[in-house]
Image (spheres, coloured by chain):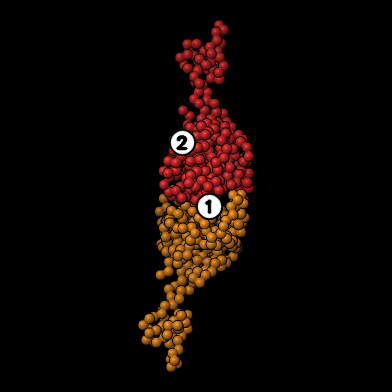
Chain colours: A orange, B red
Amino acid sequence: MIRFEVLVLGNSSATPIFERHPTSQVINYNEQLFLIDCGEGTQMQLSRYGIKSNRIDHIFISHLHGDHYLGLIGLLSSMHLVGRKSDLHIYGPAPLQEILEVHFKYSETVIRYPIIFHHTNPNEEEEIFSSRMMSIKSFPLVHRIPCTGFRFNEGKRSASILADKVEAAGVPKPYFSLLKKGIDYVDPTGKVFYASELTEPGPESRSYAYCSDTVRHPIYLSSIQDADLLYHESTFLDDMRDRAKETFHTTCLEAAEIAKETGVKKLLLGHYSARYKVLTPLLEEAQSVFPNTELSVEGKWYLV
Amino acid sequence: MIRFEVLVLGNSSATPIFERHPTSQVINYNEQLFLIDCGEGTQMQLSRYGIKSNRIDHIFISHLHGDHYLGLIGLLSSMHLVGRKSDLHIYGPAPLQEILEVHFKYSETVIRYPIIFHHTNPNEEEEIFSSRMMSIKSFPLVHRIPCTGFRFNEGKRSASILADKVEAAGVPKPYFSLLKKGIDYVDPTGKVFYASELTEPGPESRSYAYCSDTVRHPIYLSSIQDADLLYHESTFLDDMRDRAKETFHTTCLEAAEIAKETGVKKLLLGHYSARYKVLTPLLEEAQSVFPNTELSVEGKWYLV
């Protein structure tokens, strides 16, 4: 099975407390690493959990509240100091580029590797990254300032050859890749062997959706539909629903209702308010509506 | 004895490693707290060592390399979130104000307490803070970009009344404060009692000098002369002296020579390069020239 996992580096909302850190996550897909958000201290969290920052080539920033991006400048500088040469892609709100440039101007830093900015669109879903194995989309969330979520969709997984059947049919090896694509094999006598009978379908493609920060809103439901794993911010317990609306955040109960409505397989909670030292009540509230919920814990890998 | 101590929050140079953090220090003078530099993660370090950030009213930033100020925006935001109302004074290079304003503009944050900027002068020594008990000066260091050190000078300590002597002389209580100022007492018969005989001099005023980051240079020696405690960056061992010059840093041996030349009482090392996991060789090198040297350790208070 190809590895597809999420490492939570920070699960705190704006005020870091109780040894919880501002938001950041590493996605490992087949040993390619992606970083989502980069709160203050992310470079130290990466080092704590044994992730070499130079393995990351793509960084996704949801929005420009400090707890989601203030670790970025330090991380970029450290990548520079350890001699990075390869391209770094940053996907985020357009003004992020200006913010970074102001810092580098006054620190008189000339980063020695190329940084390629990709400005996210806060108004519409867009594909922002695509490879043979993975497609990544940003989509609008509803927060106090422009903000997007991100969805990682694994590419279609190829079918597997059924060894005994291709042997019995006498299919030459060069035809295997055609069979995997669903193209039938016709032998020299004209006999047809159906691809569907010589192969078994590949495993289902998996997907991960990330929603932080946002108030509950129908605009993004189609973007997270049927995800295998949904990380959804759950800043408050539901007795603070008014406060959640006011501050453009979500309660645990709402996150669970969203998970249920969109048919996701599993829900991961996070972005906990500084008012909660003990998190069990947050989990219990969400599980009352959507049992397959887990609390995100810093330093833990979650399977997609 | 009035408390005058330095808490080291971060002793790392630019790349944080081995659980060492970027530069930041708290000065406690008589329960008034001052912060010098504010590297990434300072707010978490404050919380780890039990310092309430809202007790800090004055923040001093030496220069605009990220490892000396990237924690400032997060700290200011957290002060805002916990409801700070009182004035906050920030002393640092002029462009710091622009950097903060760019962040607050795009995060649409309106800080609800007054921030008062004081631009430091990178070319000349200047008094930047003064109270009855304390005077603080900035002075030029020599780094790749404009940078200042800071010196905290305790005000003149008042003399103490010698209880038995004033009683014998029959000095009325309202005259005690005059005696402390050195004004002699003349009794109703015209007899003179000398202040110097009715009081003992106050303890010597203490001073703390902070030098980071800088290459060794005569320009700042007079500013740190005779300090009780000198924190001086010591990024490298002396076998890296060329590298130190190139990067505008100092070696441990140089820091010790500076301490000796300027007649300071004690030297505190810090701003260690990421290449040193074990720090004993740095201490030994400095002590070979200046025995009263200590390694700064995060979380430890140092007496001035």
Crowd tier of the residue under label 1, counting other residues whose Cα lies within 10 Å: few below 14, some 14–19, many 20 or above: many
Q: Position of residue A171 (x, y in %)?
A: 41, 86
Residue A293 left/right relative to A102: left
A154 on left or right of A144: left
Residue B115 visible (yes or no): no
Q: Residues within 10 Å of mark 2 (few under 14, many from 20)?
A: many
- Residue drawn at (57%, 7%), measured in percent from left and top? B190
The N terminus of chain A: image quadrant: bottom left
Above/below status of A90 relative to B166? below
Quarter of the image with the C terminus of chain A in it: bottom left
Kindly state the secondary structure of the residue where label 2 is placed. Answer: loop
Q: Which residue is mark 1?
A: A74
Find disc 2 in the rendering and name its residue. Answer: B290
* Marks 1, 2: nearer the viewer: 2
Q: Name the kind of residue labelled 2 in the image.
A: Phe
In-front residue for pair A268/A19: A19
- Chain letter for mark 1: A
Q: Position of residue B122 (x, y in %)?
A: 62, 41
Which residue is located at x 39 percent, y 87 percent?
A: A169
The subunit carrying tag 2 is: B
Q: Residue at x 59, y 61 (%)?
A: A117
**Amino acid type indicated by mark 1:** Gly
Residues at discs 1 and 2 in contact (Cβ within 8 Å):
no
Q: Residue at 50% of width from left, 36% of height from top?
A: B259
Q: Which numbered dot is residue A196?
A: none
